[in-house]
Image (cartoon, coloured by chain):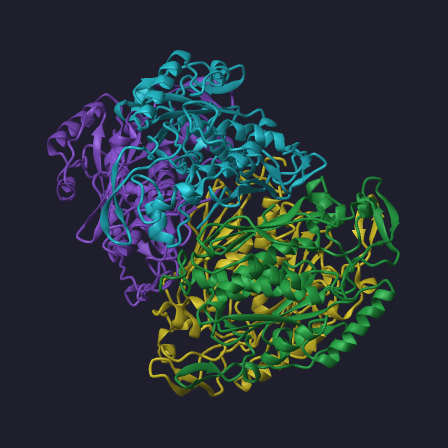
Chain colours: A cyan, B purple, C green, D yellow
C-alpha cells in the first residue's frame, strides 16, 4: 500500500478509525513558516462530526498533537508529524461486517486484497483517515498564505437543489453561517431540510462541492504527465465518495463550440488575463493566473439503515445487511474541508516544484 | 519538467511536433511478452490524422521503430524505446505565434514557464506528443490481453448529439465502421455532419469519450492515495483537451440517494458480483471485479480560424489572432485511442503493483 | 527535505533528539505478518545507549508504541506508525552551539541550508533519529525471516585492532557476549580497552562494521540504476558517520587480477553456487544466491571534549569550541544495529519489488 | 526493471550492446542552457574503446543524435533524447554464453531473473549501456558549468601501482596525456605496461578511480535519506565493476581518532572553510563548500581468456568456459568518464532540488 502523496511537499498518512491513532507526516515544508497546533486544529474542527443535525452525531475530540518539525515557533525544514489519539470509538458495532461487505463501501476491496481486514468502524477505509489530509492541508494552506494564495470549498448542490453562484467574498462569509457550508443561504436552508428528511428515512444524499483557489501565478504545473489539472483530479478523486472531477466548465464544455468557450486574452493594467475563465485557471496542464475552479461529484453516503442485499464472502452465499449506527446522511459539508486540504496540498507541492517557493528555506528569495 | 508516468510500468515520453522525433521509453514491462512493432503501429494508426474529413487533413506517416527491449520476438525485461521520426511538418506556419498565445491553448503557460518556447506546431504541447502515450498504451494492452483484460474507448457525445448506449460487443464492432468512433451508427452520422458543418464555419466542437475495461480482478488499486480511480482520473485529465473525468454514474450520482445507487452484492455461479454498476467498477479506490467505466469531457479544439483576441506578451499589448492551418474540427475521435492507451497504462501498472502480473518475468506464476 | 526511503517497503522517519518524539511510518509491509511492539523493542534495545562504558552514559528509555497497522496481532497492509516519546533530554547543554558549528558534525550544513536549526542535542541531525531506521529494520527483519533470510552486523575493526574472521554461527553467538559487538573475543577485549582509554583522553575512535545477509535468492536487484549494491551503498552511506562502503572484497579487489578474483560457478546438489565469494553475493547489481557481505568505514565520533577551532557564523569570526557532554567515544557498537536495519530495509524492499514476496498479502503465494 | 535515476534532473536509459540503439532521455534540465550534440559527443569520445592498447580494440563509432529538447540552440525545458545507433557488433561471438554464465559477470542474474536474456555482447548488461550515463552526464556537466562547478575523474591506482597525489590543475592537464588517464605520468607509464602485460597473459587488472568536484556551495544534499554522500555512493556503486565507494579519507578514517581527523573551521577572507578536508566535502549528508572527493574500487574486467569453471544452467551440470573476444584488460581508464558523468548527474539533480538552480528556466534568478 502506498500512503504518500506529493513530490516536494509530501504527506504520509497513517492510522485507522478505531485503532490507537490517526495522523500524518508532512515532509518537505520549507523552514521558517510560523506554525502552531492551533493552525491545524482550526481546520480539523471544520471536518469534525457531531456539530449539527446534517452530520453524524458521533462526537470526536480530534485534538491534534505535533510531534516534530517545529522549532522556535517555526518549521525547521524537518518532517512535521501530527497525530490524534482515537477516543469514543464503539467497536462493538461492526463485527457483523467481518465477512459481509457493505454495498458501495470499499470494504469488499479490503477483504479481497489484504486478507486481514480491520472492519471496526471501516478501519483505514473510514472517512476518519482524511484527518491526515486535513493535517497536510492545514500546513499547505498556511504556506500558500505567505504567497497570498487562498482556497475555499463550498457546497453547490445537494440532490437536486442547486445553489446560485456567488462572489468569492460572499462565499467565504456565508459558508460559516450554515451547517451545509453552502454560500446561497436560501438553497442552504432547503438542503438542510432535505438532508434531515433523508436521515429520517434511513437514506442518504449526494451533492457537488466546488473549490476555488485564487492568487496562483501563471506557470504552475508541468505540461505532460505532471499537469496541475491531472494532479488535482487525482487527489480529488482520491477522496472517498467522489465519482467525478471537473475543472472550469467541465462536462458542460462537451456541448460547446470553440468560439463559445475559448478564453481570449487581454492586457489590462499591464497584466495579462483572460476575458472569461471557462478553462478554470488551467490550460495545457499549467495555471494561467486566473482562479482555479474545480467541482467534485460526491455520492450519497453508502451507509444507510435500509435493508440491502449483500453476501457472506466466506460461505459464498447471499445475505441481507442492515447498517445501523451513527452515519452522515450527507457527507458533502464535511467533504468541503477535505477538498480544500487536498487542493492546498497539490498547490503547495507545485509552488515548490516550479520554483515559486524556495524548497528548503522560506526566507530565501527565489 | 517531468515526462514520466507509472510506478512499475512506466512511460517516459519525449519529442515535439516539429522536432526530429517523438517517442517514448516504456520501462518495467516484464520479460517474455511477445511484441512486434506492428502491435504498436496498429494502435498508432488509429490516432493518425488525415484519415477522414472529421480530422485534420495533415498526413503523418508515423511509422514506429523499436530501438530496444525485444529479444527473440519477446520483451526481455529491459526498457522498450519506440521512436517516430517526424516528417511532413510545415514550420513556416507558426512563427506568428511566438509571442502571441492562442486562446485556450497551453502556449501561454509554456511562454511564462520556460522562456524558450518551441512554437512550431505547438512544439511539445502539440497533440502529436500523445504518440508517446499510444506507444506505451499499445504495449500495456498487449500485456493486459495475456490476463484477458480488454479496453475500448468510444465517442458517446458530440456537442448536443448523444449516442444511445450499446452492448460492448456492438461497441467494438461499430466504432470501426465510422470516422467518429461512435457505437450508435445513427448518432455517428449526425455527429459527422455536425463536425463537417462546424469545420466549414471555421469553428470546432467538443464531446464525451467513454472507456470500458473488462476482465479486471477485484483488488486493483490502493485504498488511500494511490487509488485506481485517482490514478485513472489523473492520466485521463492529463490528456490535452480534457476538462472533466467521471467514473460510473459520475456527476449524475450527486442528485441521487444511497438507496437508489448503492451497488448491492450477489453470489451467482460461485462468483460475487454487484447487481448494478453505478460505481463503475471501482469502490474505495479498488476494483471490485465489475467493468471499469470512465467518461471524459473533451473541449472543442481551441485552434479555430475565427478572429480572436489575444496579446503580445513581449510588447504587453492587445493583438488580434487568426489561426490558419489544418486543425481537427473535433478531437474526440482521435482522443479515443489516447484514452484507451492511458487507461491501459494505469491498469498494467496496477496489475504489476498488486501482484497479479509478475514484475520481472511473465512466465513466472504469481 | 525528504525523509523517506524505499519503493515498495518504505520508511518515512520523523522527529528530533530533543523534540516531542521520534519515530517512523513503515508503509508497504504486506498484510498477515505477525508483529508486536516487542519485535521492535528488542532491536531498539540493541542501539540503546548507557548499557556499557564504551557508549554514552546517557539513559534513554526508548519505549516504542505502535499507533497503527496491526490488526488481530498481524499486519493488515496499512502503514505501521511507531513512535517513541522523548524523555531525559538536557537541552541546557547545547545553546552554545547555536551559531558555532562543531568540527566534522553536520550542523554547519543545517545552519546554511534551513536557517532555523534546532541545535538541541543535534536536533534531527542527532544519531537518535536512527530510531526510525531501527523501527523500519525490525519490521523488515521479521518479514525477511518468513523467507529464511537472516542478517547480522558485527564490528571487525576499531582503530588499528582487527578482528579475526569467524563463522556466522560464532559471530551470532559472540557479539552478544561483549559490549563492542565484535565476534573475535580477544580482539573485543582489546577494543574495549582502547575505547575506554580514548574516552579518558576526551578523544574518540573509528572502526569498521561488517554486515552479512544469508538466504537471499538469486535475482534480487535490478541491473542498471536500481541495483542491489547501489541501494545498499546508499542506505549504508546514509548512516551518519559512514565514509566508505564496500561489497565483497571491496577496495582490496583493486590490486587483483581477474584470474585471482573471478567467482567461478559450480553445480553441487543440484544447486548453482560460486566457489569463492569475492563478489560478496552481488554481481551485475543482482544477488547471486551467495551471502551478501558489506563493510562500512565508521569515522571517530566528531564530538570530542578537546579544544577545537570553529567559527561564529553570525559574527563571521574564529572561535574556539569545547564539546562537553556525554558522548560515545566510539559509535561502532551502536552502528551495528543501524547497519543491520538499513540492510534489512533494502532487502525487504527488493524482495517485494522482485516478486519474491507478495506485495499486499503475505499469505498469497507467488 | 527501473532504468531511471534522479529526482528533478532525471536520466532514463535504454538499449543493449548489440540491439538497434542505445541512448537516454534526460528529463528536467531547465530551459535556456546552450547545448549541442558536440557537447555530448566530446564526453562520449572519452569512453570510446579502440583508442589505445589498454582498452578493447573494438571500434565503436558512437555518434550521438539528439532527437528532442533543443530549440534555437538552447534547451527548452522538454526532455532531451539522445541516441546512438549500434554498428560494428559481432553477434556471432556470444551464442556460447546463452546458458553458461561467465564468472563474476552479471549474466547469471539476468538469466535467473528475466528468463529471456539477450546474451549478445552482454546485452543490456554490457558496459556499452553506460553511454546513457555519459549522455546524461555531459548535459549535467554543461549545466553545472554555468554555476562554476567542475568535475574531474582520474585513475589513482592500477593493481599495486599507486599514483602520487597531484594538484587539480596538474590532474586536468596530465590525464589527457596518457591512455590510462592517470595524473602521475611516471606511474601512468608503469600502469600502461602492466595492463599490456596482463593483456598478453589473457588476464585483467583492477584499480581505483578518484573524482573531484569543485565549486559546490554549502548545503547540497538532505540530511537523512537523500544525503549527498548516499546518492553519490549509490550512483557510483551502480557502475558495473565497482565494489567499493569512499568519500574523503574513506576506509582510512576507521583507524583514526577524532582529534586526528575532525575538520576544524576557520574564517578567511569572510568565507568559512575547513583547515583539512578529511570529510571530502560532505558532512551530515550535506556539502560544506569544500571539494567533494570520492574514490571507487574497480574490479578487474571479469572477461578473461583463461579457462574458467562455469555451469550449464539448463542441464544443471559443470562446464568449462573460455571467453574469447576483444575485451578491455583494464576498465579503469574508461570508467573515469562514467564516474565523472555519474557524479555530475547527482550534483545537477541536487543543485536543482536544493534551490541553487531554478527548476524550469536557467535565466530565472534564485
Q: Residue lying farthest left?
A: B186
Residue B225 seen by the camera:
no
Number of dots carrying numbers: 0
Task: Tell me if C264 is positioned left or right of C14 in this view.
Answer: left
Q: Tell me residue B125's x, y (percent).
A: 39, 36
Task: Tell me if C52 is positioned left or right of D139 in this view.
Answer: right
Q: Which residue is drawn at the image coordinates 39% and 20% (left, top)?
A: A264
| Foreground pick, A104 / A348 | A104
Q: Tell me residue C153's x, y (percent).
A: 62, 70
Q: Tell me residue A224's x, y (percent).
A: 41, 40
Q: Which residue is drawn at the image coordinates 36% and 25% (left, top)?
A: A208
| Foreground pick, D186 / D321 | D321
Task: Tell me if B110 is positioned left or right of D19 in this view.
Answer: right
Q: Residue lying farthest top?
A: A186
Residue B320 seen by the camera:
yes
| Foreground pick, A98 / B193 | A98
Q: Tell me residue B329's x, y (percent).
A: 25, 29
* As drawn, A122 above or below D118: above
Q: Which residue is drawn at the image coordinates 80% and 69% (left, top)?
A: C195
Quarter holding the C terminus of chain A is top right
Amino acid at each position: 500500500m502506498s500512503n504518500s502523496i506529493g513530490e516536494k511537499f509530501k504527506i504520509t498518512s497513517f492510522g485507522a478509525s478505531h485503532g490507537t491513532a490517526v495522523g500524518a507526516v508532512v515532509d518537505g515544508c520549507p523552514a521558517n513558516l510560523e506554525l502552531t497546533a492551533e493552525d491545524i486544529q482550526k481546520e480539523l474542527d471544520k471536518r469534525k462530526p457531531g456539530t449539527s443535525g446534517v452530520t453524524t452525531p458521533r462526537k470526536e475530540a480530534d485534538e491534534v498533537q505535533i510531534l516534530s518539525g517545529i522549532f522556535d515557533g517555526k518549521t525547521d525544514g524537518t518532517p512535521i508529524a501530527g497525530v490524534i489519539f482515537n477516543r469514543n470509538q464503539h467497536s462493538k458495532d461492526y463485527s457483523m461486517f467481518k465477512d459481509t461487505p457493505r454495498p458501495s463501501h470499499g470494504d469488499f476491496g479490503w477483504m479481497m486484497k489484504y486478507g486481514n481486514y480491520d472492519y471496526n468502524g471501516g478501519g483505514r477505509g473510514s472517512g476518519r483517515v482524511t484527518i491526515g489530509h486535513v493535517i497536510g492541508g492545514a500546513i499547505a494552506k498556511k504556506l500558500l498564505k505567505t504567497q497570498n494564495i487562498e482556497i475555499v470549498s463550498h457546497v453547490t448542490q445537494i440532490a437536486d437543489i442547486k445553489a446560485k453562484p456567488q462572489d468569492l467574498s460572499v462565499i467565504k462569509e456565508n459558508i460559516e453561517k450554515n451547517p451545509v457550508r453552502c454560500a446561497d443561504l436560501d438553497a442552504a436552508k432547503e438542503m438542510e431540510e432535505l438532508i434531515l428528511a433523508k436521515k429520517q428515512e434511513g437514506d442518504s444524499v449526494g451533492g457537488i462541492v466546488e473549490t476555488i483557489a485564487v492568487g496562483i501565478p501563471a506557470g504552475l504545473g508541468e505540461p505532460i504527465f505532471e499537469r496541475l489539472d491531472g494532479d488535482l483530479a487525482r487527489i480529488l478523486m482520491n477522496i472517498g465518495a467522489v465519482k467525478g472531477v471537473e475543472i472550469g466548465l467541465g462536462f458542460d464544455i462537451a456541448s460547446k463550440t470553440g468560439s463559445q468557450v475559448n478564453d481570449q486574452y487581454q492586457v489590462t493594467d499591464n497584466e495579462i488575463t483572460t476575458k472569461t475563465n471557462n478553462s478554470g485557471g488551467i490550460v495545457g496542464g499549467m495555471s494561467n493566473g486566473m482562479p482555479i475552479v474545480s467541482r467534485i461529484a460526491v455520492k450519497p453516503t453508502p451507509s444507510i439503515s435500509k435493508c440491502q442485499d449483500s453476501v457472506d464472502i466466506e460461505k459464498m452465499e447471499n445475505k441481507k445487511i442492515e447498517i445501523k449506527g451513527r452515519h452522515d446522511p450527507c457527507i458533502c459539508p464535511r467533504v468541503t474541508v477535505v477538498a480544500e486540504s487536498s487542493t492546498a496540498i497539490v498547490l503547495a507541492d507545485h509552488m515548490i516544484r516550479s520554483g515559486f517557493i524556495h524548497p528548503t528555506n522560506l526566507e530565501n528569495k527565489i
